[in-house]
Amino acid sequence: MNDMPSVLILGAGPIGCGFAASFLAAGFNVTLCDPSDDARASAPDLVTRHGAAMSLAGLPTPKGSAQLIAALPDRIAAPLVIEAGPERLAVKQALFRDLLSRGDTAIIATASSAITVSQILPDPVDQARCLVAHPANPPSLLRVLELVPAPGTTPQTMDRAEALFRQGGFDPARLGHEVPAFVFNRLQSALLREAYRLVDEDVIGVDALDALVRDGLGPRWALSGPFETADLNTAGGVRGHAERLGPAYATIGRDRGEIAPDWSPALVDKVEAQRRAVLPEDALPARRAWREQALARLLDARRKILQGDGA
């Protein structure tokens, strides 16, 4: 073993093996635990496939291989445990109870897409070392992930988890508290709900709607999120965007029955302050020029990929 940290990953499916490939690339000692003989047998090939995709993306590739085990060790020595098992509450509850009994120092993170730590461990006393680490899929390529604390998760746990995931090559986004479905799924569901409504109302067809997202929103959002996009698209930055388009968006919200569709002045101030902390107003012109050039390069690369794939 080397001096790098260790990570124990429960579940040798696509998500678990994606995590394994990423941590191996960062030099971690990785152990994959799965009771299924078939899952353990297929895990090396899955990790290799993740590694090939990482190479294509210009990312560091896995070094060495993961240790494969069928059962948990009596005592957990790894500072980080990632549970990537079935998305079933009863299964996760049993796993977490077992994990908590096998050591008192490891951080235990579930890669659940929607199940919170509060559901897995209702008693806040049991939550101190536990959190959600919800990855994008596949985690070997898309390195952003949500770190979601439970009410009993300690700040020290969040700090240690963030540091370990960063050391493993990830870019964690820390949430302030639990929210149903976390943030990835809430944003995705907002877009999909409206998409389904528009198709149901015969406003647009499925393929045309996909084209608007794929060829319009998608390329911009690949370079900047919704707040930065609003900041760059409008004179006056994100505040100017809210002043010009906020009323129209509120009308859409009321049309859809939203309870509080308006953006209050205090909320706009909050968003503006956080954007200016990231990018001062006098830096907006340079950032807009950068995005214009980056978007052109992105679209050129995308065109070549699609033509090469025959799509």
Image: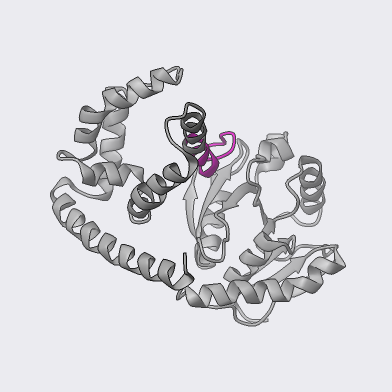
The one nearer the camera, 216 or 38, is: 216
Q: Quadrant of the N terminus?
A: bottom right
Coordinates of residue 192 in the picture (x, y in percent) = 51, 37
Q: Is residue 28 above or below residue 121?
A: below
Using residue 58 as the reference point, say whether residue 105 is left or right of it: right
The one nearer the camera, 290 or 7, is: 290
Q: Which residues are magenta?
A: 177-190
Using the rendered view, name the quadrant where residue 264 is placed: top left
Residue 36 in view, yes or no: yes
Q: Residue at x 60, y 81 (%)?
A: 63
Using the rendered view, name the quadrant where residue 20 is placed: bottom right
Q: Residue at x 33, y 27 (%)?
A: 249
Q: Is residue 107 above or below residue 209?
A: below
Coordinates of residue 19 in the picture (x, y in percent) = 62, 64
Coordinates of residue 305 in the picture (x, y in percent) = 42, 69
Using the rendered view, name the quadrant where residue 148 is placed: top right
Total marks in image:
0
Coordinates of residue 93 in the picture (x, y in percent) = 78, 43
Q: Is residue 18 above or below residue 52?
A: above
Using residue 26 as the reference point, say whether residue 6 is left or right of it: right
Q: Residue at x 51, y 78 (%)?
A: 55
Q: Is residue 164 magenta?
A: no
Q: Residue at x 28, y 30 (%)?
A: 268
What is the image's colouring? one colour
